[in-house]
Image (tube, grey):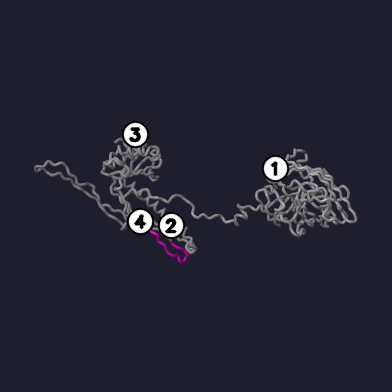
Amino acid sequence: MTETGLFQRIDGTRRVRGLLLPFGELSRPNLSGNEPIMFSADSITLPRDPSVVTLNRQHDRFDPIGRAVALEKTPAGVVAEFEIAETDEGDSFLASKMRKLSAEVAELVRAGANAVRSKLTGAAAVDEGAFASAALFAVADGVIGEDHTETVYTDENGREYRRVYDSTTEQTTTDAGVTTTTTTTITETTDPAEPDEGEADMANAQVPSTLLASKAETKDKADPITSATFAAMVATAIRQPENRETMLAALNDVKIDGANAVGTGAIPPEFIGEIWSGIPFVRRIIPLLQHGDLTSLSATGWRWTTKPEVAEWAGNKAAVPSNTPATEAATWSFQRFAGGWDIAREFIDFGETEVINSFLTAAAGSYAKKSDAWVLTKLLAAGTAMNVTDLPADVPKALAGIVDGALALIANDARPSYALVNPADYRPLLFTKKSDVLEYLNMALGLEDGDLSGFKIVPHTGITAGSVTVGAREAAAVHEMSGSPIRVNALDMVKGGIDEALFGYVQFRDYYAEGIQNVSLTPVAP
């Protein structure tokens, strides 16, 4: 491998050439954490005027050492020729062994590991790079480069390639100018390189001038620089904003989403409207009871506390049996429910009626749920407490409670029509065939028509675990104002809103306590 040494110059020239940005070669991860990237000829745009590309040292914009005089896309990549400035800094660079280049790229758009679009804005001479090919070269008459180089690079599919270069470059200077001739042999294989001592320092790998173009001479015989041996490592880097630190091979990502991503603000999300948030609430208690319309602020009635009774009579002038019947008055008030909201009138003005309709539908569902729970509280409070007599083996305890509660109703001249069960106690019933449950109840209850098809068993979290409630439909009633919940709206002229409100009125009437049995599933002997 030829040691590049110091730059050599033809009298009166300060030009250098190099492979600034390789094509088809995957970079190494850089210090800023960006993923490796690969460029192609179509993914980089070169400025029409190459002089806008300034060469600096270590990506320090305050340390310029030259300016591009030629930029060219070749099969190997972007080749750049720089005129080194007549400054102390330029002299220092030409006297140094700094041979690696790093492109400064802006407006980068990438798709995975592939660059899609970018713009070349600058270049830097650096100590370390990211790509495994390319270099700067120097000039002098005679044999100015003999190179045997083996480099490894990775393509977009993750396959490793090994390139072997054997190159000899000669240069002659005449009155007509400078002539450079390069003879190069390139061998490429997909076999990965074996680790050796040189693998730890890829920066010493060299690329011959024939990678730049298949020419035996320089582009212009008046050019002061010839194609010689390139230095091994050329990095790519983004030119950072003025007040940000530039890092080696730091390519700024343009992401589709996330914090400060272009796509976050530029690509609107799909709007799908209201999403499903559960089935609308369906009352479970009120439908089990008698139902009527509420037409007054209160209701009164009466019930027998002692009913008239007859008895056996002996006749033949014997005293006729008699008893002392008694009654009591009953009075029921009602429960009010309401909810109101001051909604911005823009929902109406801009036709967002779907939002308002969904809003009111949800509010009406809340009224149905709250009123149903209130009625259940009243129903349980109006019932009669009792315990099961025993829990037969192999029978769900809730089923035993339903039977005992139903028998208590029948004993009190009421026909059982429903049972309320906690979900924990209801679960064992699910493992019993429905036909078996109904048959068991029919046989146990012995109803006059032997049919329980209208009997409902309803699981409800409002029932305490370890208990069931068995009731007759006629034992209680619910009266509700027709149209509840009633919607009322008005304009809010002061705040520019629409006042929306719902009002509902429900009344619970407990008629017959013996027709509602709250059964504890803890056995108590009769």
Q: Which quadrant holds the N terminus?
A: top right
Depth order, front residue of 290/20: 20
Q: Residues within 10 Å of mark 4 (few under 14, many from 20)?
A: many
Mark 2 or mark 3, earlier in chain: 2
Place residue 186 in its image quadrant: top right
Q: CA distance from mark 2 to mark 3?
A: 50 Å
**Could you tell me if the residues under marks 2 and 3 are in contact, i.e. CB atoms within 8 Å?**
no
Give how far across and how far down residue 192 sits, in percent: 73, 39
Residue 498 falls within the magenta-colored stretch: yes
Q: Which mark is residue 505?
A: 4
Q: Mark 1 or mark 4: which is in front?
A: 1
Residue matched to label 2? 360
Q: Specify the amino acid type for callout 1.
A: Arg
Give how far across and how far down residue 132 sits, in percent: 75, 46
Depth order, front residue of 237/504: 237
Mark 3 or mark 4, earlier in chain: 3
User: Secondary structure under badge 2?
Assistant: helix
As drawn, the residue found furthest toward the bottom would be 493
**Could you tell me if the residues under marks 3 and 1 are in contact, i.e. CB atoms within 8 Å?**
no
Give how far across and how far down residue 128 sits, in percent: 75, 47
Q: Is residue 325 above or below residue 498?
A: above
Q: Mark 3 or mark 1: which is in front?
A: 1
Residue extent of the magenta highlight: 481-499
Mark 2 or mark 4, earlier in chain: 2
Q: Residues within 10 Å of mark 3 (few under 14, many from 20)?
A: few
Q: Which mark is residue 457?
A: none
Q: Residues within 10 Å of mark 2 (few under 14, many from 20)?
A: some
Query: Is residue 195 visible in this depiction of the protein?
Result: yes
Residue matched to label 3? 392
Depth order, front residue of 323/112: 112
User: Secondary structure under badge 1?
Assistant: loop
